[in-house]
Image (cartoon, grey):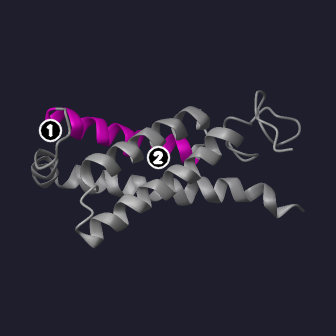
Amino acid sequence: MNFTRYLPFVGRLLIGLPFMASGLGKLMNYAGTIAYIKTTALPLPAPLAYVGALAVELGCSILLILGFQTRIVAAIFCLFCLTTAVFFHAHFSDQNQTFHFIKNLVMTGGLLQLVTYGAGALSIDNRGSKRGGQASGAVSAG
């Protein structure tokens, strides 16, 4: 049995679960999240940014874990990570914020792998694939 076929699912799970936890944290702390959003230079009203963050973190994390529309979802997460890095973590005099800025860049790099190579064998995207590998239109690694 080829265990590498399970690795893309494990990767999607390890990327999706922290986003889901973050979204649930925002859901449980509306007032605190709104107050934090208001402290940034984000050019959106705080309630709209809050709803957008919930949609991305909760909705896209579920889709990513299931492997549904993985390339599109990963691209949305890339934009989300870069946006939050710039508007929430670009305070380089604060070591903690610098760490979070770099963390967001690292997550973007991992998500770009999903944009490029797709969900892998164990996914809704590939449920009909006879090869059990990449969906049609996938970029070849070789």
Disc 1 residue type?
Ala
Marks 1/2: CA–CA distance: 22 Å
* Residue 139 counted in the magenta span: no
The C terminus is located in which quarter?
top right
Residue 43, placed above or below residue 120: above
Q: Are marks 1 and 2 in contact (CB under 8 Å)?
A: no
Q: Which mark is residue 46?
A: 1
User: Is residue 51 located in the magenta-colored stretch of the structure?
Assistant: yes
Magenta residue span:
45-65
The residue shown at (20%, 32%) is 48
Badge 2 element = helix
Residue 17 position in % (x across, y down): 47, 57
Magenta region, main secondary structure = helix
Furthest residue toward front: 93
| Residue 96 percent coordinates (x, y) | 28, 70
Position of residue 66 measured from the top left corner of the image (x, y, whole percent): 59, 44
Mark 1 surroundings: few (<14), some (14-19) or many (≥20) residues within 10 A: some
Closer to the chain start, of discs 1 and 2, is 1
1 vs 2, front mark? 1
Instruction: Residue under label 2, please give it.
Output: 61
Query: Which amino acid type is shown beneath numbered disc 2?
Result: Ser
Instruction: Say which residue appears at 60% left-offset and 35% top-offset.
Output: 71
Counting from the top left corner in percent of width and height, residue 68 is at: 60, 36
